[in-house]
Amino acid sequence: MKKLFFAAFALVLTVPVLILTGCYTTSFSGSSSNLNHNESNGVWTITAASVNGRLTRTFNITQAGLDMFMVSSFNTQGEVELVITQGDTRKALDITSGFLVPQRVDLDEFEAGRISVRLNFTSARAVATVVSWRV
């Protein structure tokens, strides 16, 4: 009976973790100084003193989130590119310091479901980028 209780307890703890980790993933490859990124309620904020590499976030998005997808970005040096992919569909935007005011990104060619949002940084300095899909 004791073994059954512990097995059930472990399952109760494991299933929510598996469900939550299946919702999104974030990865970074490259070099950075003071890189911070945080996502809360559909708003992904990225700041860094300097960054050279790519930061990718994969998650499920609703149709309403696609309709409200916005980006703003600032950096003092280097380049920043936003790349959104879903299957064979790909959209790339140069957001190097040209998106100080949040701008809607047209994602009409995308569907609700799993998407990947990648930020490519090339020798970028004083980076402040916000990507949002909050409804």
Image (cartoon, grey):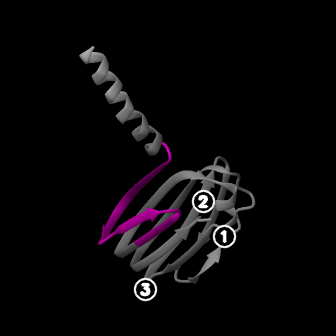
**Label 2 or label 1, whichever comes before in sequence order:** 2
Residue of label 1: 105
Tell me: 48 left or right of 24: left
Compared with residue 134, is residue 17 higher up or lower down, i.e. above or below? above
Q: Are marks 2 and 1 in contact (CB under 8 Å)?
A: yes
Tell me: 79 left or right of 35: right
Q: Amino acid at mark 1?
A: Val
Give the residues drawn in magenta, as a range: 22-46
Count of all numbered marks drawn on residues in the image: 3
Query: Residue at position x 53%, y 69% from top?
Result: 131
Tell me: 60 left or right of 48: right
Residue placed furthest toward the right = 108
Query: Residue at position x 41%, y 76% from top?
Result: 124
**Residue 109 image position (x, y, % from top left):** 74, 57
- How would you rate the neighbour count of disc 3 (Cα within 10 Å): few for under 14, some for 14-19, many for 20 or more? some
Q: Amino acid at mark 2?
A: Ile
